Image (cartoon, helix red, strand yellow):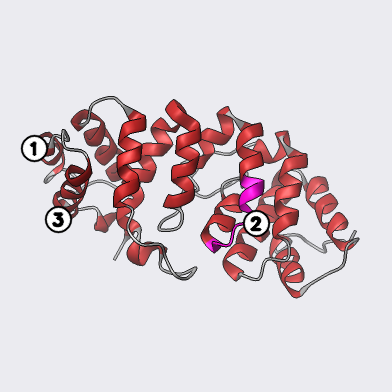
Amino acid sequence: MKHKDYYNDDYILEFSEKIRSVIPDFDEETFTRALTGQLEDKELFARLDCIVDAMERSMTDDYSKKLEAFFQILGPELTRSEGMFTFGWWLWPIGRYVERNGNKDWRLSLSFLKELTKRFTGEYAIRPLLKEHPNEVMEELISWTKDENVHVRRLASEGVRTRLPWAQKSLVALEEFDRYARLLTNLKDDPEKFVQKSVGNNLNDLYKDAPEKADFIISQWKKTGQSKAQDWIIKHGRRNQKNPLCP
């Protein structure tokens, strides 16, 4: 089943009921009428955007109150690193809503994404916050690298990738390089492969934009010893390099 096919007429009805359960003035009729029978010919992100458009037309314009309501329907946290699209896929339109509106209350949005990512990814929604508030958000993400939840640690890394798939290029890694290096360094020995892969992908992205900076980060790591996790991350980060030199 393709990701886009999850977001069909049955989903619209169920999602509408979930929203109505926490937002009494949500206009279910307007929401469902705008979407029922309208998504079949659209690709994934077009479907998500249609859903968010309908959400915005069906709710009053008070972003912070709506976000506080959405906290109530997130459901149980994932118990393992796997399962994001098995159990949390239905939350993507909410993440898309935050991606579009998050800077209306960026601090609340950041808190919400920390909870969202324990059920479904927030890697796209966090990027507009990073763009508008790079210093503050990067500092918060650095603190997330020490979180006990693997999904929170993974989001700290995944959200700052320069070339995240399906997302616009981000330059925060270059513009906030000291913070970016601290963030990755905090995760270089993470025991979870889910996090290791994200850190390695960060380095792989960085090699395409600023290879000298990627080499610098790795050289600093090697001054403080190595681990199996770190070795795997470096190998994964350098997987597209021809004859990579070891700093």
Q: Residues within 10 Å of mark 1 (few under 14, many from 20)?
A: few
Does dot 2 land on a helix, a strand or a loop? loop
The residue at the point 67 percent across, 66 percent down is: 190
Q: Which residue is mark 2?
A: 146
Residue in the foreground of this view, choosing between 73 and 201: 73
Q: Nearer the viewer, mark 3 or mark 2?
A: 2
Work out whether residue 144 or residue 237 is closer to the camera in this orientation and state it.
144
User: In the image, what residue occupies the spot 24% across and 53% down?
Assistant: 7
Mark 3 nearby-residue class (10 Å; few <14, some 14–19, many ≥20) = few
Which three-letter amino acid code belongs to the residue tagged 2?
Lys
Q: Is residue 166 above or below residue 128?
A: below
Residue 181 at x, y percent in the picture: 76, 47
Q: Is 193 inside the magenta-drawn segment?
A: no
Q: Is residue 179 above or below residue 63?
A: below
> Image quarter for residue 187?
bottom right
Q: Name which of mark 3 and mark 2 comes first in the sequence.
A: 3
Give the number of the mark in front: 1 or 3.
Answer: 1
The residue segment tinted magenta is 141-150
Q: Is residue 114 left or right of residue 210?
A: left
Label 2 to label 1: alpha-carbon separation = 44 Å
- Give the residue at mark 3: 10
Q: Secondary structure at mark 3?
A: helix
Identity, as a three-letter code, of the amino acid under mark 3: Asp
Q: Is residue 144 inside the magenta stretch?
A: yes
